[in-house]
Amino acid sequence: MNTMTIMDRTLNTNATKITAKDVNVYYGDTHAIKDVNVEIEANTVTAFIGPSGCGKSTFLRCINRMNDTIDVCRVSGDILLDGEDIYDKRVDPVQLRAKVGMVFQKPNPFPKSIYDNVSYGPKIHGLARNKAEMDEIVEKSLRRAAIWNEVKDRLDAPGTGLSGGQQQRLCIARAIATEPEVLLMDEPCSALDPIATAQVEELIDELRGRYSVVIVTHSMQQAARVSQKTAFFHLGNLVEFGSTGQIFTNPEDPRTESYITGRIG
Amino acid sequence: MPTFWLVLLLLALSALGYVAGRRRALATADGNPGDLHSLPIYYGANVAMTTAVPAFGALVIWVLAQPLFIENRVAGMIPQNLIPENASLGLVMSDVRRLAEGLDLAVETGAMTQAQTLALESETSDIRAQLGGIGVALGSEVRPEVLQAAQAFRRLASNGKDLMILATLMLALGGLTLSFRKSHKDFRARNVVERGVLALLILAASLAILTTVGIVLSMLFETVNFFGLHAWKDFFFGSTWAPNFRGDSELSILPLLWGTFYISAIALLVAVPVGLFAAIYLSEYAGSAVRAFAKPLLEILAGIPTIVYGLFALLTVGPLLLKVFGQGENGLLGLSWMSGATSVLTAGVVMGIMLIPFVSSLSDDIITAVPQSLRDGSLGLGATKSETVRQVVLPAALPGIVGAVLLAASRAIGETMIVVMGAGAIAKFSANPLESMTTITTRVVSQLTGDTDFASPETLVAFALGLSLFVLTLGLNVLALYIVRTYREQYD
């Protein structure tokens, strides 16, 4: 896919998966996210773009409450997943993270075998009743992450011994093994070479069939290649949100245009 | 001239060399530092260095070697018949040294003139009384041969000293002139100083290594002496530790080794869980405020002298255990399993408390070094904090933690004071932790304290024990380092 065809890309009108209303995030005295409102659809790849430090990763980490692990971080406003407020007191952040998986900037396989890496989540959440079921989950996840053929003969080898691109796909397999509904990706390709990047991007497009994917990226080409919706963040504000084709070819806000044409950022 | 003034003079010379070298280098560049190869201070430092280093080196060697040389020469002057029965040459030599020092002192205090001391005759004057007057007590009347030897001793010492001063000053002046003349603007003084710094660092490192080698060698020689007097089979494979002075001691290391391992094992059973859990709390759960406050507090434990732990064992833990497990009807449980306050358990528990900061501090550093991305990965999959710690952080940190535990173990094996005061002194094989037992370290202490005869196996066994201990802890440390190094790269 290249940018020329963006306009022609069909955009199904999907159900809303995540709704954010007036979200503000503070790190101590720093106001990192200012009144962000966004609606993320199911079975869609949504890209967050913007210059470094604009708050796109911070906002991403709000969606599965990873910011809870940072002491000085405060979040206000509502984030609804399927209509339920995830910051409600009744919601267990640990359960939430099983439903909203995350893939990180740097591949971070655990220092365990490939098999144990993938079975880690299912084991914790009790998704398999016996070894056969677990084997099935592991194989399915590795297949969906398009890495099964490369590792099927060495599932006992340490996950840290794989190449960077393989490690990142292993991490994606690990994330989808818990059957999440949403997959958050924080610059998943920034540590990968172009070939591994292409593999992961292809994978992201396939994952759209099952999950709602939110990807933070620094590469505008990547956003254009993989996403249907794009949100542009600048200095903690959500400047513009719309279909990828519209954002890249006909942005409404002058700041978006400046960023996309390379004048700011 | 005393050596002290010589040292000052050498320092003054090298200071002078610094100023002169710096000035001359600047002069060759017409006062423009930019034309110099090196900064002006390097030229100064180079001259100062070449002045001081060879001179001080010669001084140190001379001071160490001169007494040996004189001793050798003077010893040859003493006739065999002068050495009393059952005594050695050393005894006579110490008389000679004492007399020589006494005469020197007499000259210094003005009681005699230099000429008077040289003219002394043992037959005509009462040297013992004269020296007694200025506070030098001689053991017996001075015999003519001893006086002669003492005079020779004084002559050699005084000549040697003059020669030493001459030689070191020559070296200093030679170095000064040589490097002063080299202080030209094209001279690469900076590189020379760099090599000097390197030599200094190598010297420091090799001193540390040589000391270790020296310690091991001194132990090794005495150990060889020991095995010359006592069967090695009994030492390594015997079953009884029963030293006596009738000459039929049984000196086996095995009962001591058993006590050492038993006490160390109990200490580790206390220290590893507590220390590890404390480390996990501090590194994973505690907020930065708690951490900043609690970590130093925990490390204070490491700063307490072990004798204080020994007192704690003797006065608090021992009686407490006795109250629980002993004293029959009067005890808490009505048991009489324990007869005295000193026991393996007492020493083990207190030693465990001592080791807690070792384990916790090292493990805390290691756990903190596990990349945050691994924790994020696990938390992002919906794992709780303790699941993350148990299944991801600890396995990743395990090699380091094993290393920390092994280091703690080698501390425990080498610990002395706590065992002396808390474990008792009975060497035996027993599995009952409430009985007294003893360790290698405490036996080394007891064999070497008091009146000792360095020709008996009962004393020399201390060196064999010490060497065994050294080999044991060295092995543990090497193993710990090996484990830490081999598995460290896993997540780097």
Image (cartoon, coloured by chain):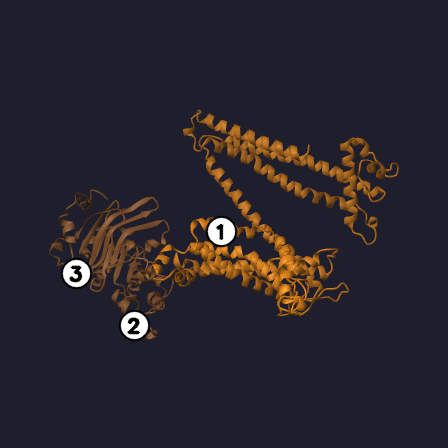
Chain colours: A brown, B orange
Image quarter of the C terminus of chain A: top left
Residue A6 place in picture, x, y as percent: 13, 54
Secondary element at tag 2: helix
Position of B74 relative to A93 (above/below): above
What residue is shown with label 2?
A: A136
Q: Which residue is mark 1?
A: B295
Earlier in the chain: of badge 3 and badge 2, it is 3
Is residue B438 shown left or right of residue B352?
A: right
Using the image, name the chain to which the residue with label 1 belongs.
Answer: B
Residue positioned 62% across, 31% down in the render? B9
What is the CA distance from the residue labelled 3 to the residue labelled 2? Answer: 30 Å
Element assignment for label 3: loop
Task: Quadrant for residue B149, please give it.
Answer: top right
State which quarter of the image contains the N terminus of chain A. bottom left
Q: Amino acid at mark 3?
A: Asn
Estimate how packed mark 2 is, as few (under 14), some (14 to 19) or many (20 or more) residues with alpha carbons within 10 Å.
few
Which kind of residue does numbered mark 1 sit on? Lys
Q: Three-letter amino acid code at disc 2?
A: Glu
State the image coordinates of residue A81 (x, y, percent, origin top left): 25, 59
Looking at the picture, do discs 1 and 2 lie on one chain? no
The residue that mark 3 highlights is: A14
- Residue B416 visible in the snapshot: no
Q: Nearer the viewer, mark 3 or mark 2?
A: 3
Given residues A148 and A184, the one toward you in this image is A184
Mark 3: few/some/many CA within 10 Å (<14, 14-19, 20+):
few
